[in-house]
Image (tube, helix red, strand yellow):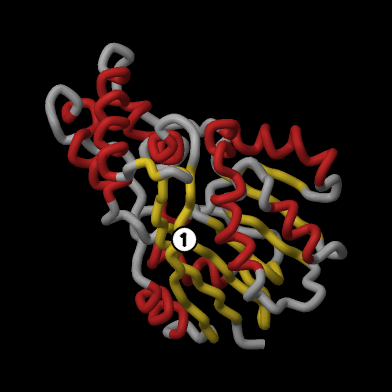
């Protein structure tokens, strides 16, 4: 089945999810770009930062999820009236004209074989322009491996087989790919230590992103049992401390400039 996204669930930890975007944006030294595109904009809360950074630019947010775009359009009049939001799939998105800054935040990990997509994304950027993206790099952590292991067990396996799962590459892989097509590239990684609070906070985090396709693939009679066991295993892997639950989260960042 095709999964859908829940903007409200995704935004539970909006501040923590937004930090990598702000860190990425800080390393893009574009001066007065005319066109800026947020490819995979989600609910649009971070796209507004692009409009604040470059107030004279035409800013467009694009996402394949109608639910996310609806949420973005609903919020935009009050926070970023000049930003346009459109439904579109980054795998076949092509701008009418090359853009000056193309940003993609926590999206490419959902596109299998996305290294091969990079040349087409670069071709959408104007000479001297910028391509900047970040992807999670934590897929070997318990927050993902526990879900994979549980989903492979009966009675869940027959329903979760072939479900969408995210993946990414190391910074050096993106560096090699983009330098190889003529870009000047800065690539790095950062591990954030998010301190989460509330009931079953790691489950709340993953159920809004990486685990959502798996949860949606399960029939209604099996989902509660899967969720209960996933919560139990996650709580064991990420024990509560007096100040909250610590979720280490590795992120991969890339900023590439095209030759002028």
Residue 56: x and y in percent read 87, 64
Q: In the image, residue 88 lies at what x, y percent?
A: 59, 45
Estimate the x, y position of residue 258 in percent, counting from the top left: 60, 82
* Quarter residue 75 falls in: top right
Position of residue 40 in the picture relative to residue 235 (left or right): right
Q: Nearer the viewer, residue 88 or 76?
A: 76
Q: Seen in the image, is 187 located left or right of residue 160?
A: right
| Residue 91 in view (yes/no) | no
Residue 217 in the image, given as x and y percentages of width and height: 32, 27
Residue 14: name its quadrant: top right
Residue at horizontal 16%, vertical 35%?
152
Q: Residue furthest top?
A: 221
Q: Is residue 3 above or below residue 210?
A: above
Outermost residue, left side: 154
Q: Does the image show residue 57? A: yes
Image quarter for residue 36?
bottom right
List the residue tagged with mark 1: 192
Instruction: Identify which residue is drawn at 27% across, 56% down.
Output: 140
Label count reads 1
Residue drawn at (29%, 24%) of the image: 228
**In the image, residue 61 above or below residue 151:** below
Looking at the image, residue 50 sits to the left or right of residue 239; the answer is: right
Q: Tell me the residue at 40%/32% (across/down).
A: 200
Q: Secondary structure at mark 1?
A: strand
The crowding category of the residue bearing disc 1, from other C-alpha atoms within 10 Å (few below 14, some 14 to 19, many at least 20), is: some
Q: Nearer the viewer, residue 22 or 212?
A: 22
In this view, 84 is above or below 119: above
Question: Considering the image in quadrants, where does the N terminus appear?
Answer: top left
The C terminus lies in which quarter of the figure?
bottom right
């Amino acid at each position: 089945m095709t999964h859908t996204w829940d903007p409200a669930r995704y935004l539970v930890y909006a501040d923590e999810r937004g930090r990598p975007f702000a860190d990425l944006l800080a390393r893009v030294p574009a001066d007065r770009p005319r066109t800026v595109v947020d490819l995979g904009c989600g609910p649009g809360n971070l796209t507004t930062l692009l409009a604040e950074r470059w107030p004279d630019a035409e800013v467009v947010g694009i996402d394949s999820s109608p639910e996310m775009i609806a949420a973005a359009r609903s919020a935009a009049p009050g926070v970023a009236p000049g930003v346009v939001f459109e439904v579109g799939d980054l795998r076949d998105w092509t701008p009418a004209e090359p853009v000056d800054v193309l940003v993609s935040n926590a999206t490419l990990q959902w596109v299998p074989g996305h290294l091969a997509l990079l040349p087409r994304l670069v071709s959408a950027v104007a000479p001297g322009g910028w391509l900047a993206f970040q992807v999670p790099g934590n897929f070997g952590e318990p927050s993902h491996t526990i879900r994979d292991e549980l989903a492979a067990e009966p009675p869940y396996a027959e329903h979760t087989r072939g479900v969408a799962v995210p993946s990414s590459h190391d910074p050096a892989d993106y560096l090699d790919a983009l330098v190889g097509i003529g870009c000047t590239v800065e690539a790095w990684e950062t591990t954030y230590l998010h301190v989460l609070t509330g009931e079953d906070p790691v489950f709340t985090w993953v159920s809004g992103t990486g685990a959502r396709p798996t949860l949606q693939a399960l029939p209604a009679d099996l989902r509660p049992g899967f969720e209960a066991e996933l919560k139990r295993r996650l709580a064991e892997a990420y024990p509560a401390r007096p100040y909250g639950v610590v979720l280490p989260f590795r992120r991969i960042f890339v900023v590439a400039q095209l030759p002028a």
